[in-house]
Image: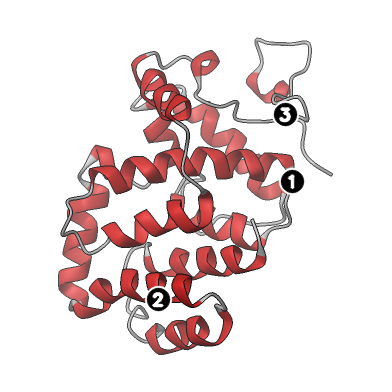
Amino acid sequence: MNEEQRLILAIVSRVVGYPDDAFFDEKDDLLQTIQDEIQQEDVKDRLLEALEPLYKLSLQVLREAYVTTFDWTESTGLYLTAHELGDSRDRGAALILLQHIIADAGFELADGELADYMPALYELIAVAPDNVHLKAIQLRLSVATHRIAKNLPQDHPYKSTYKLIVSDVLGEPTAEDIQKLEQSREHTDMEDMPYPILYGMDGMAKTDNPNNPMSNMKMCQ
């Protein structure tokens, strides 16, 4: 991910979370940052066009759209492991491992925030130095974000933003990656995760104890 892609992801991470009271207060600064810092004119135009539908709505209407879409609808939810594991009890172990990756990168979760909340993960990979674990999260996010964008109605105010996250930042997932995600939701065993939660240079970091999920952790130094 290059620096301009990091900036785009940092910007959109601010607008795809729950619209708080500062949402419209931050609008001018965000738009000015786009104008000043995004050098590729076609990318700048796509980003401004993607954000425009969000800023056309009132805060109340935007909040209602957010809750209905992202809190009440499974296929467009904003929790990464829910896309990967559904309601499986294995999500608990997956969340613990994500917590360790986040802490190892030098960041803390906001109060009450789950480790797999996708807007926060967007921000994390936008600002944290690259390591093998964060690259793995980026891959996982690309597949889940693609699923969200695909399932949003064509006229939904958030659709263009999620499509842009995939096309201009995270990259389009392969058909194989998408298939792995769908299969993992049907067979929700930790061994059937679409991607290993923790990666080493060979793709997966493991110790000799396969029965202890916490012992499989190898944090990047």
Image x and y of residue 165, in percent: 44, 56
Q: Secondary structure at mark 2?
A: helix
Q: Circle 2 sits on which residue?
A: 45
Query: Does label 1 or label 3 sit earlier along the sequence?
Result: 1
Q: Quadrant of the N terminus?
A: bottom right
Sequence-wise first label, 1 or 2 = 2
CA distance separating discs 1 and 3: 14 Å
At label 3, the amino acid type is Met
Q: Residue at x 40, y 71 (%)?
A: 47
Instruction: For the residues labelled 1 and 2, say whether their Cβ atoms are less than 8 Å apart.
Output: no
Q: Which mark is residue 217?
A: 3
Task: Judge the density around disc 3: few (<14), some (14-19), many (≥20) Cα neighbours within 10 Å.
Answer: some
Q: Residue at x 74, y 19 (%)?
A: 206
Q: Quadrant of the C terminus?
A: top right
Q: 127 and 109: which one is in front?
A: 127
Q: Label 1 sits on what residue type?
A: Asn
Q: Is residue 91 left or right of residue 56?
A: right
Q: Amino acid at mark 2?
A: Asp
Per the rendering, the mark at residue 172 is none
From where the camera sits, is residue 119 visible? Answer: no
Decide: few, some or many residues near mark 2? Use Cα within 10 Å; few <14, some 14-19, many ≥20.
few
In three-dimensional space, the C-alpha distance between marks 1 and 2, rounded to whole angstroms, equals 31 Å
Q: Earlier in the sequence, mark 3 or mark 2?
A: 2
Kindly identify which residue carries mark 1.
131
Foreground pick, 140 / 214: 140
Q: Tell me how far mark 3 sits from mark 2, CA to CA.
A: 42 Å
Query: In which image quadrant can residue 162 be found?
Result: bottom left
